[in-house]
Amino acid sequence: MENGKIAELRSLIYGKFDSQTEFAEFLGWSKQRLSKVTSGKKEPSISEVFEIANGLGIDISVAVRIFVHYWVTKGHAKSKN
């Protein structure tokens, strides 16, 4: 994930939670799992993106926009010709 997207995601998290640890606990995730997603080290599944969106109270389209660049650069979003 590019730095701007990481910053956007972290801004959304800190806009609602005091820490990433608090958000991870809210989601029922480990701190390490969330850290890997927010740092771009782990590709989130679509269900994880839904969980993040719901946890932050944001529209799924906002969360998808944050992660779509990661999916495209990793070759997971292929266009149909």
Image: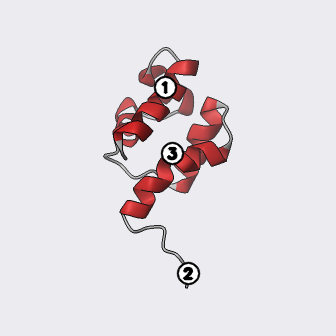
Work out how far the residue at label 3 is from the one at label 1, CA to CA, in angstroms. Answer: 12 Å
For label 1, the residue is 11
- Give me the disc on residue 80: 2
Quarter of the image for residue 75 reads: bottom left
Q: Label 2's element? A: loop
Q: Label 3's element? A: helix
Q: Amino acid at mark 3?
A: Ile
Observer-nearest of 51 and 5: 5
Quick check: 3 left or right of 27?
left
The location of residue 81, given as percent across then percent down, is 55, 85
* Residue at the top extreme, as displayed: 18
Q: Amino acid at mark 1?
A: Ser
The location of residue 3, given as percent across then percent down, is 35, 38
The location of residue 16, given as percent across then percent down, is 58, 20
Mark 2 surroundings: few (<14), some (14-19) or many (≥20) residues within 10 A:
few
Mark 3 surroundings: few (<14), some (14-19) or many (≥20) residues within 10 A:
some
* Residue at the left extreme, as displayed: 41
Work out how far the residue at label 2 is from the one at label 3, CA to CA, in angstroms. Answer: 22 Å
Observer-nearest of 28 and 22: 22
Q: Residue at x 44, y 59 (%)?
A: 71
- Give me the disc on residue 66: 3
The location of residue 69, given as percent across then percent down, is 44, 54
